[in-house]
Amino acid sequence: MGVHRLRSLMENHPRIYRDIRLRNSRLVVDGLNLLYHLYFSSGLDQNHGGDYAAFENMIERFVSALRVCGVSPYVVMDGGSDPSDRKLETVNKRVTNRIQRAHRAAVSGQQLDILPQLAKLVFKQTLARLEVPLAQCYAEADHEIAALAAEWQCPVLSNDSDFYVFELQGGFLPISLFRWEEVKQTGSHQYIPCKRYNTSSFCIFFNIQPQLLPAFAALAGNDYVDLRKTDSTRKWAQVASDLEGLLHWLKGFQQPQDAFEAAVGMMGDMNQKKKGELLQGLFVGMEDYKIHPSSLKKFFIHGIAPPFIPGKEEVVPIPDWIRLPLIQAKLSPNILDVLVLGRMSLSTTVDHKDKPSAVLVSRPIRQVMYALLLGIRCPRGVEERDRVGLELKVTSVQPAFRGVKPQLNLNSLHKAESSQCLQVLLETLGVPQDCLGRLPSDLRLQVAATCYWLKKATPPPDLRVLKALLLWWSNEDSTRQRIAAQNQHYNHKLDMDVSHSLNQWQACLKDSLRLNQLLGRPLPEPQTSRLYEGTIVHHIIWRMKSGLKLKKLDPPSVRRYRSLLAATRRFSIPEPATPSDTQQKATASPQQQKQQQPLTDLTTSLKQLFLLYDDDDEEVETEAHSGIRGERDALLDDLVSVRTRYKTKERNKHCNSTELVHKQCKGIL
């Protein structure tokens, strides 16, 4: 929620805090706050799509610092949106602001706190790998964090100003004052120096009754109630103009009701109905800070998922099986928004406002997700909340099985055969299953998503973007070292076209990962932190565009690169034209004709994609030429196999064209 202006007030009065040495303790961590703080305070890349390996390393160092001091973290993250929609207006304003900041970041090059698309998944995967206890709530996490910390009598780590109001015996540790990178030692013990806040210290400092602190928060305003939006008189405006003035005014009251009635009485001419509504809103705002028994304690100790208590009627009934993977953060919390609210909020990427939203390309993947969640006969579409230009727009999107047989439903999805789920996933992405068997298991999902992107992205991706991604996957450590050896730091102006294409690729990968999770992971989930490092990928593309070569790619990496290229080429390049296709092309629009790739262009591009080596690296050069010849032969095989599906008459006509294809390919080498 957040209390307006309260963090600034605390910055002006640091004496309220107490210096402590944190060690040998449980610690309840506000996961989303920690994620944002670690990423945005570290200087990691935001404008080129994210530096996920560096982010993973920072998470590892944070967890290591806690454990060396005997601190046991329990991370709690937000889940779905508030089903009451009390916060919807505030959320809309924040999203609109984020859209505008993303455009400014693209144009100016400034880092304006736009979280890269896959950062949350990297955060969750890293915590799971490090075996850090993690719970993802069904809705906002504040109350669950406070309840768990109250039961365990341990501190909360967060930057959310609401924790200045919750009465927590273990106290509240602001992340911004948590010096985890400066672990100290006293005797045989290590500790983290930090500052602790207690509500009792606040009340003593400002001389107000403890029971008035939640009333103060409600009167100050938060995401749910804000008296500043009412037609208040000058008298109340003077009282509430700054928080210290409001606290001074509250000294004269003993009980919240007296303070609320006095505040409403200062609102000027207002009918009784309106006054009653204001009073009710203030009491509801105050009740938000009441701590209830924890529903996560059993989950963290016994692995039992809490019951789901919806705040409104769901679009479809939520099956019981989905609770545990949701609370374990093995499913995206957006699933609850679709089931409960019929709504999907989409990522904001650093893009120019004149570019279409990067997430449009992956909408067909989401439509299959909606069909699995809601059924294909759902009477209403899902409201997708996305940008058009600089504005937030809502579009109704219908569930659909595009090219996929509607053979699965949500109630029994967890019992479905893995082969069935894999079929749905691959048919959605348009990738035949037999192509993936040649790849290592950890590459299959990203290659399938990349094939989908190559086929669906508009405009079609520059093949240098594909080459940069494949180079990175071939050997990210070697690629990083080669860039460092060249002493080249990528500080060029953002290439809007390249950035948009990579944003589209990340959107396809993100939604493919989500669909794979919903289907029970028929393909192994890759380690997301190893898939992309924005500044290096952009730098590779810049060097290729500038006509500069990369230094020495070793033969094993060339072989890995070649297998990746083979998979993406075989199942993302359009089938060769038939005579009927040629007739259709004659009547196509200029834009449609532009998007059709002639065979010679494809084969030439294939050759260019293999040029990875320096002129003086004969071993790698031999590998690369071998790869071109192998891909040429595979291309010819594919051409023949594709055309065997056509009628006998077309097959006979095809003989002459096949000979021509051989001549064209021989000419390349």
Image (spheres, rainbow, N blue to C red):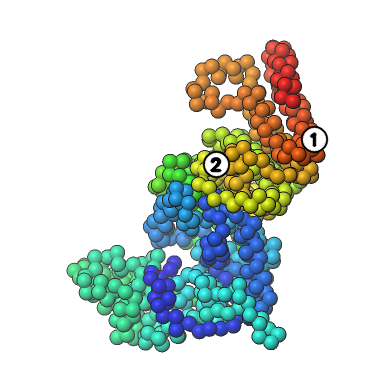
Considering only vertical position in the picture, is 112 above or below 561?
below
Question: Does the rendering let one see residue 146?
Answer: no
Mark on residue 248? none
**How busy is the neighbourhood of tag 2: few (under 14 within 10 Å), some, or many (20 plus)?**
some
Considering only vertical position in the picture, is 367 above or below 640?
below
Q: Residue furthest front?
A: 616
Question: Which residue type does callout 2 highlight?
Answer: Val
Give whichever of 306, 540 is nearer the camera.
Answer: 540
Q: Residue 420, how many percent across, how many down?
A: 70, 43
Q: Say which label, 1 or 2, has the lower sequence index.
A: 2
Give whichever of 322, 644 is nearer the camera.
Answer: 644
Q: Is residue 473 left or right of residue 356?
A: right
Question: Which residue type does callout 1 highlight?
Answer: Thr
Q: Residue 147, how many percent across, how many down?
A: 53, 75
Q: Quadrant of residue 1?
A: bottom left
Residue pointed to by mark 2: 498
Q: Residue 37, how many percent across, how many down?
A: 53, 65
Question: Does the rendering let one see residue 227?
Answer: yes
Disc 1 secondary structure class: helix
Considering only vertical position in the picture, is 491 above or below 206?
above
> Which is in the foreground here, disc 1 or disc 2?
1
Disc 2 secondary structure class: helix
Q: Please give the name of the residue rendered at 30% of the width and 67% of the height, measured from the top-left corner.
A: 228
Spatial CA span between label 1 and label 2: 30 Å
Considering only vertical position in the picture, is 128 above or below 67?
above
Q: Please give the name of the residue rendered at 34% of the width and 73% of the height, measured from the top-left corner.
A: 219
Residue pointed to by mark 1: 622
Q: Please give the name of the residue rendered at 69% of the width and 49% of the height, measured from the top-left corner.
A: 482
Q: Is residue 489 left or right of residue 104?
A: right
Give whichever of 293, 435 is nearer the camera.
Answer: 435
Q: Please give the name of the residue rendered at 52% of the width and 62% of the height, measured from the top-left corner.
A: 40
